[in-house]
């Protein structure tokens, strides 16, 4: 379990900062999309886009490690 956490955090740290920030605020800090938009000063659409592309990139990084 701890090894998986380390692997996840390493992959997360490879993402562009805006995507990493959106993912952390949403999934770790449990903020709503609207709250993240307010915190980061970007539109709701931008938050959605960052989450979408961040999850996609993170999935690709983690699958690449397990292949």
Image (tube, rainbow, N blue to C red):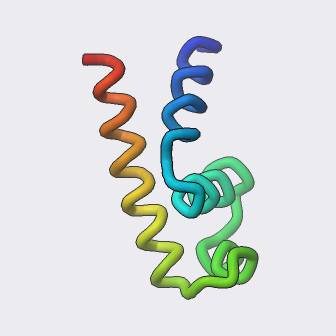
The residue positioned 58% from the left and 12% from the top of the image is 3
The residue positioned 35% from the left and 21% from the top of the image is 65
Q: Is residue 57 left or right of residue 18?
A: left
Q: How many marks?
A: 0
Q: Position of residue 59 (x, y in %)?
A: 36, 40
Q: In what quadrant of the picture does the N terminus appear? A: top right
Q: Is residue 49 left or right of residue 60?
A: right
Q: In what quadrant of the picture does the C terminus appear? A: top left
Q: Is residue 56 left or right of residue 1?
A: left
**For this rendering, which residue is in front, 34 or 37?**
37
The residue positioned 38% from the left and 60% from the top of the image is 53
Name, please, the residue furthest toward the bottom: 43
Residue 43 to residue 36: above or below: below
Q: Position of residue 41 (x, y in %)?
A: 68, 83
Q: Quadrant of residue 13?
A: top right
Q: Position of residue 62 (x, y in %)?
A: 38, 30
Name, please, the residue furthest toward the left: 67
Q: Position of residue 6 (x, y in %)?
A: 61, 21
The residue positioned 69% from the left and 75% from the top of the image is 40
């Amino acid at each position: 379990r701890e090894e998986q956490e380390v692997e996840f955090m390493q992959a997360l740290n490879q993402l562009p900062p805006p995507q990493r920030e959106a993912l952390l605020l949403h999934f770790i800090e449990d903020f709503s999309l609207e709250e993240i938009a307010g915190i980061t000063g970007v539109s709701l659409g931008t938050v959605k886009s960052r989450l979408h592309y961040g999850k996609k990139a993170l999935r690709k990084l983690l699958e690449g490690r397990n292949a």
